[in-house]
Amino acid sequence: MSREAVQKTRSLRERDADTIAEIARLRFSPLSLIGGRGSRLIEEGGREILDLSASAGSASLGYGHPAVVEAVTEATRDMAGASLLLYPNENAVSLAETLLAVTPGEGARKVWFGHSGSDANDCAVRVLQAATGRSRFISFIGSYHGNLSGSMAVSGHTAMTHTLPRPGLVLLPYPEPFRPRFTADAVLDMLDYQFETTCPPHQVAAVFIEPLMSDGGLIVPPPGFLKALADRCRRHGIRIVVDEVKVGLGRSGLMHCFEHEGLAPDMVVLGKGLGGGLPLSAVVGPREIMDHAPAFALQTTAGNPVTTAAGRAVVETVARERLWERAARVGQVFSDGLRALAERHEIIGDVRGRGLAVGVDLVADRESRAPVPVSTTAKVIYRGYELGAAFSYVGLKGNVLEFTPPLTLTEAEALEGVAIVDRALADVAAGRVSDEAVAPFMMW
Ligand SMILES: *Cc1c(COP(=O)(O)O)cnc(C)c1O
């Protein structure tokens, strides 16, 4: 038998299990893919799946968007090298100019390109420490800034307790309006107390902020909290870094999610949706920091003309079509639809988010707001997959359904998604998904 014939006898899923490292897998359902178009993924076998996740927000314009296809095809056919660190190329420089133009900020700024949110936050940590001569950072419990040494070391997600945070990191609770264990004032008090005692503020280089905490549970911060926190930090020369990787570039209903919070960040970190599905990230920051030293944060193929062509196509399409307005409008239809489900499904404790970043907090009991066990969330996702939709869960207790669909999602697709969630919740309540079925899909 030829090699190809042998392969055809085994499913993609089986071959994946045999070959792809467990350390690189975070799977929420048995879905394996052979293609995708618009908001639809094509499962092995040919079934269409409505993608309510956009591959964790990466496919910001959906799959196969003509602007991305044309830009990437053109850039690949006549390729201006493959390395921005060795030679400038038009797509990278032009994208940098566009990002500087669309990202509010004071003073002279510059752009760094990478491949992922993880490397961008890594770069930010390292250059901030070197340029400011301060080695401490502040971030939040529940925050996810990446999965490389430096970005993991300033994260506070429970999925990262296998790796120690960097020495001197101060982790603050992220005030959660739905479960107000720590109020905004209590957290600000904690910060003041840290500054007065074991964390002299002049030792702190920067605070890393998710303007809408995504992996920590799709939490919209209480109004005014992040601004108050940023003001306190700035008084001590602490830089404000805003991690827009998952919720930036139109998803929240504004171009940048931090604009909802009245923040004026020193540094903005972009990723995921920036590349429209291709590996691309960026840091936009003050010139005196970004020019700290030559050849300080190098990755050979970062900023190459193909990925930055995709980035240009994404940012230009978002700006030209004002996709943040569409995200706000379709996001409203989607979250209103999900909120209406709460009348029928006791398990829905809260529906929250901004634009097309929406979370559904599942509770065992509305009174206590106790989270459901993660197996219940996993069952809803599994049943959603069987019914034809892809989405996943977040939250430190794994009880929040997360929806970050393409910004090009239509209202009809949003309503179709609501109907699938409706049925999935009903079917899980009726016991139609077994514990065995979901056991392999509770990886975090
Ligand atoms: C996903 C994510 C990252 C890491 O991005 P990768 O592309 O997975 O490296 C960083 N910050 C936030 C807020 C994210 O959601």
Image (spheres, helix red, strand yellow):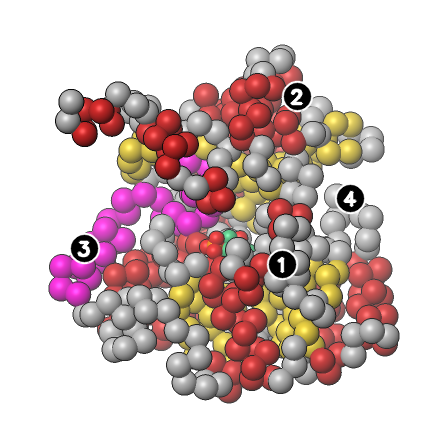
Q: Where is residue 363 drawn, in percent x and y? A: 72, 31
Q: Is mark 3 within 8 Å of ligand 1?
A: no
The residue under label 4 is 179
Left or right of residue 377: residue 249: left
Left or right of residue 84: residue 184: right
Residue 344's disc number: 2
Q: Within 10 Å of the Cα at label 4, are there few (<14), some (14-19), or many (20+) other Cα atoms?
A: few
Depicted 130 relative to depicted 413: above or below? below
Circle 3: residue type: Thr
Q: Could you tell which of marks 2 and 3 lies nearer the N-terminus? A: 3
- Disc 1 + disc 3, Cβ < 8 Å: no
What kind of element bears circle 1?
loop
Range covered by the magenta-colored residues: 51-79
Residue 155's disc number: 1
The residue under label 3 is 73
Residue 426 location, quadrant: top right
Q: Image quadrant for the N terminus?
A: top left
User: Is 393 a magenta residue?
Assistant: no
